[in-house]
Amino acid sequence: MMRTRALYRAAAAAQGEKIVVLGSGWGGFQVALNVNKNLDLTVVSPNNHFLFTPLLPSTAVGTLEFRCVQEPVRTVLGPKGQFLHGKARTLDPENKTITVQSVHDDTFEITYDKLVIAVGVKTNTFGIPSIQEGNGIFFLKTLKHARMIRNNIIDVFEKAAVPTVTPAERKRLLSFVVVGGGPTSCEFTSELHDFVKHDISRLYPDLLPLVNVTLVEAGPALLGPFDKALQEYAHGLFKKRDIDVRLGTAVTSVEDVELPDYHFPSRQAMLSDGTAIEFGTMVWSAGLAPRTFTTTMTDTLPLHPRSKRILVDDYLRVKGYEGSIWAIGDSAVNDTGDTVIPQLAQVARQQGIYLAKVFNGTQQETEKEFKFFSLGSMAYMGDLKGIYDGSSAGEPGKEMKGNPKLRGLLALLLWRFAYWGRQTSMVNKILIPMHWFKSFIFGRDTSRF
Ligand code: FAD
C-alpha cells in the first residue's frame, strides 16, 4: 500500500497537472494550505484573504479588530502557487477553461486540469425587493459588512447625540433590528449587548435608556441547530436583557418613513404580525442563497433542484465530471447519503483537507469516502457566556456518547480556546487574545473609520 501511494504521488507531480481552486474561504483556503509545493496551483477569489467567519460578529462591534480574523492568501501560498484577484464568471468543462473577471474589471481565461469549486453562498433576501444593502440595512458575511455595521453603530450614536434631534428620532436611531434567529444573528445580538452594556453606558450614558434591540425569527425557536434546553437558555438570557425576541414572525418589507421633524432619512421594518419597527440599523442574516456563479451553471453542472447547490458524490466529485471537477463547502451537496451535510465552516475545512490529500497523492481519488466528523456546535451568548452542544459530535451514525452540553463561562472558554486554536498564523494567535484582553479591560474602540 505504501509503495502504491508513493508511485501515485510521483505520477501526479510528474504530470504537472494544473489545479485551480475557486474561492479563498473555509474550503478553498484549506486546499491551498495543504497541497504540496510541487503541484501547479492557482487560487481565484475576489477576496485576497481567508476570513475566519466565526469571529466576524465580534469585529462588528470592535471586540476584535478586523486584521486578526483574516489571513492573506498569498502568505500561505508563498512560492507554491499563484493567486488571481477576481471572480470566476463562466465555466466550460469540455475545454477545461474558466473565464475570470478581475477586480479591476478586465476579463481573461484560464485553463485547468483539476478544478475545485469552493465559492460558498450569499445572503438570502427571499426575493424581498426592499431588502438591499444600504440605508441602514446590513448583511453580515464579509469583512466589508462588519466594517460597515461597526461604522453605522457609531454613526447612529453620534447622530442621536446631536442636541437638535428630537426624542422620537433619537429612539428611532437607536433601534436595532436583527433578522434571523440562527447562530450568526444570536452572536451578533450578544456582541451588541456587550458593547451597549460596557461601552455605550460609559460613553453615551444619556442615550443608554433609548437603546432598543429586536430579534426577529420566522421559525418557532432561536438557534435552530442547537438542543432545546440550550435554545431556551439563550432565549432566557435575551429576555433578561430586554431584547425583544419575536418568534414566528418574518420581516416582509422595509419602507421609508417621512416625518417633518426628522433630520435623517428613516426606515421601518414591516413584520408579518402586522406591526412596524422603525430602525437605525438592521442586520439581516436570515438565510443562505446560491451565488450567481453557481446559478449560471444550470446547463453545465448538476445542481440540486431546490437549493441549487452543486451535486457531488461521496468523494466530492461533481457528477458527470469525475476526475476533473470537485465541489466543496456551502456551494456543494452530496445527494447519495441519507443525511444532508450542514453548511458549516468545519465541513468546508475538512473537505478542503480531504481534497488536498487526493491532490498530494497521499489518498487516491476513490480510496476513501469523505465523512464529516462533527465537533459539535458552539455560540457566544454575551456577558462572558457561551453554549456548546456536543450531541451531534462524531461521524453521522457514530455520534459521541453522553451528549455533552455546556453553557455559561465554561462554554465560553471552550469557544474561545477552540477558535484560538484554529488560527493558522502565529500573528493571529497573538493578536486575538490581546484584543479580547484589551476590550475587557479598556473597552472597545468607538472611532469611526
Ligand atoms: P466561504 O467561506 O464563504 O468562501 C467562499 C469564497 O469564494 C470566498 O473567498 C469568496 O470571496 C469566494 N468567491 C465567491 N464568488 C466567487 C467566484 N465567482 N469566483 C471565485 N471565488 C469566489 N460555521 C461554523 O461551522 N461555525 C461558526 O461558528 C460559523 N460562524 C459563522 C459566522 C458568520 C458571520 C458567517 C457568515 C458564517 C459562519 N459559519 C460558521 C458558516 C461558515 O462560515 C461557512 O459554512 C463556510 O464559510 C463555508 O465555507 P466555503 O469555503 O464553502 O465558503
Image (spheres, rainbow, N blue to C red):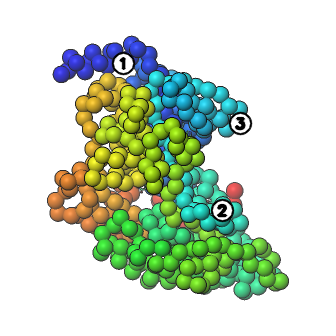
The residue that appears at 43% across and 64% down in the rendered structure is: 183
* Secondary structure of the residue carrying numbered label 2: loop
Residue 72 lies, with reference to residue 238, above or below; the image says above
Q: Looking at the picture, which amino acid does disc 1 mark?
A: Ala
Taking the spot 38% from the left edge, 68% from the top edge, the residue there is 224
Q: Which residue is drawn at 74% across and 78% down?
A: 257
Q: What residue type is labelled 2?
A: Gln
The residue at the far right in this view is: 260
Q: Position of residue 37 (x, y in %)?
A: 42, 22
Tell me where residue 126 sits by quadrant: bottom right
Q: Which mark is residue 12?
A: 1
| Camera-nearest residue between 28 and 109 | 109
Cα–Cα gap, marks 3 and 1: 34 Å
Q: In this view, does 63 lie to the left or right of 282?
A: left
* Measured Cα–Cα span from mark 3 to mark 2: 23 Å
Q: Do the residues labelled 3 and 2 touch (CB within 8 Å)?
A: no
Q: Earlier in the sequence, mark 3 or mark 2?
A: 3
Q: Which amino acid does label 3 sit on?
A: Asp
Query: What is the x, y in percent for residue 101?
Result: 65, 35
Label 1 vs 2, first from the N-terminus: 1
Q: Identify the mark nearer the N-term, 3 or 1.
A: 1
Return the residue at label 2: 132
Instruction: Quote the CA–CA distance across marks 1 and 2.
Output: 46 Å
Q: Which mark is residue 105?
A: 3
Q: Are there few (<14), some (14-19), or many (20+) residues within 10 Å of tag 2?
A: some
Residue 342, placed above or below residue 300: below
Residue 275 or residue 82, whichever sits in front: 275
Percent position of residue 267, x then y? 70, 75
